């Protein structure tokens, strides 16, 4: 089992719809969770950090479910510009090392259609 | 503007040659990272450095080498020992311990001919 897993998609969604996708992780000791957006042939860009209480930024809502070990990303009123690949990242504490590595999912491709 | 720069954007190399990818940041971040991304796969960690003059192997360090002589710079050398070097290479940095958000440079796309 991979440490971090995502449905690769693509998710084909009409403009204006709501879409949600999940990211599961295997290390119950993980403490930090992130969603990144990656456009084609570009670098990933931080979209949101995911907090225990959940957090919202405009049309985007991120949730953490520790019991089931997954994080989710909800996009409301989707725009054409939301088309991208969404990567999740989860920290993995390295033994004898106080700094955390991030482990990455392979990404979920989202296509918003007019 | 603060940020991370990588050069070159595209790089072509003949088999058997070593090549060095540049990564510079002016964010005053302590930690720096090198990743490799292949189509349909997540980012895989090659090397990381938490502090100047110190670095650790990631999951796929074989065939790569790094140095961290300055806080701002973390160059990656892809050696001829790397069996399949064609990939998209991404450099990232973070503030360091306790701050896990990583920020990326624009990447270098390496093609071995």
Image: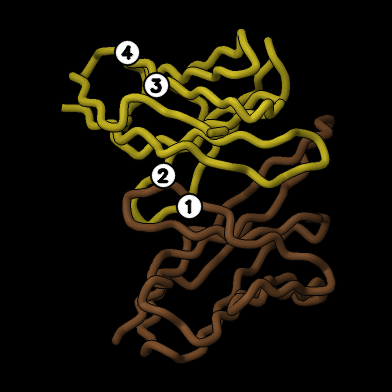
Q: Are marks 1 and 2 in contact (CB under 8 Å)?
A: yes
Q: Can residue A1 be seen here?
A: no
Observer-nearest residue: B56 or B75? B75
First-in-chain label (1 vs 4): 4
| Structural distance between the alpha carbons of marks 3 and 4 | 10 Å
Color style of the picture:
by chain
* Image: B78 above or below A49: above
Mark 4: secondary structure = loop
Look at mark 2 in the image and give the residue it sits on. Answer: B37
Evaluate whether label 1 is on the same chain as label 4: yes
Report how far apart the C-alphas of labels 1 and 3 lie in the structure: 20 Å
Residue A113's spot in the image, x, y percent? 31, 84
- Asked if labels 4 and 1 touch by Cβ distance under 8 angstroms, the answer is no
Q: Chain A hue?
A: brown
What residue is drawn where x is 66% and y is 72%?
A: A57
Helix, strand or loop at label 1? It is loop
Callout 2 secondary element: strand
Letter of the chain in yellow: B
**Residue B69 placed where, x, y %?**
61, 8
Q: Which residue is mark 3?
A: B21
- Which sits earlier in the primary sequence, circle 1 or circle 2? 2
Write down the residue under mark 4. Answer: B18
Question: Image check: B43 left or right of A2?
Answer: left
């Amino acid at each position: 089992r991979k440490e971090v897993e995502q449905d690769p998609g693509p998710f084909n969604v009409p403009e204006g719809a709501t879409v949600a996708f999940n990211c599961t992780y295997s290390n119950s000791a993980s403490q930090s969770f992130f969603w990144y957006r990656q456009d084609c042939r570009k670098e990933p860009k931080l979209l949101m950090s995911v907090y225990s209480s959940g957090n919202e930024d405009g049309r985007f809502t991120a949730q953490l479910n520790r019991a089931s070990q997954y994080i989710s990303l909800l996009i409301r009123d989707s725009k054409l510009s939301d088309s991208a690949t969404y990567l999740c990242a989860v920290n993995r504490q390295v033994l004898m090392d106080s700094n955390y590595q991030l482990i990455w999912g392979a990404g979920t491709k989202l296509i918003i259609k007019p | 503007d603060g940020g991370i720069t990588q050069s070159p954007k595209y790089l072509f190399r003949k088999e058997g040659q070593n090549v060095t990818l540049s990564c510079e940041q002016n964010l005053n971040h302590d930690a720096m990272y090198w990743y490799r991304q292949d189509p349909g796969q997540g980012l895989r960690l090659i090397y990381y450095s938490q502090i100047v003059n110190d670095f650790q192997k990631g999951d796929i360090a074989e065939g790569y080498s790094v140095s961290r002589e300055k806080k701002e710079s973390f160059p990656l050398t892809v050696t001829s020992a790397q069996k399949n070097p064609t990939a998209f290479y991404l450099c990232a940095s973070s503030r360091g311990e306790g701050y896990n958000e990583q920020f990326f440079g624009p990447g270098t796309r390496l093609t071995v001919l």
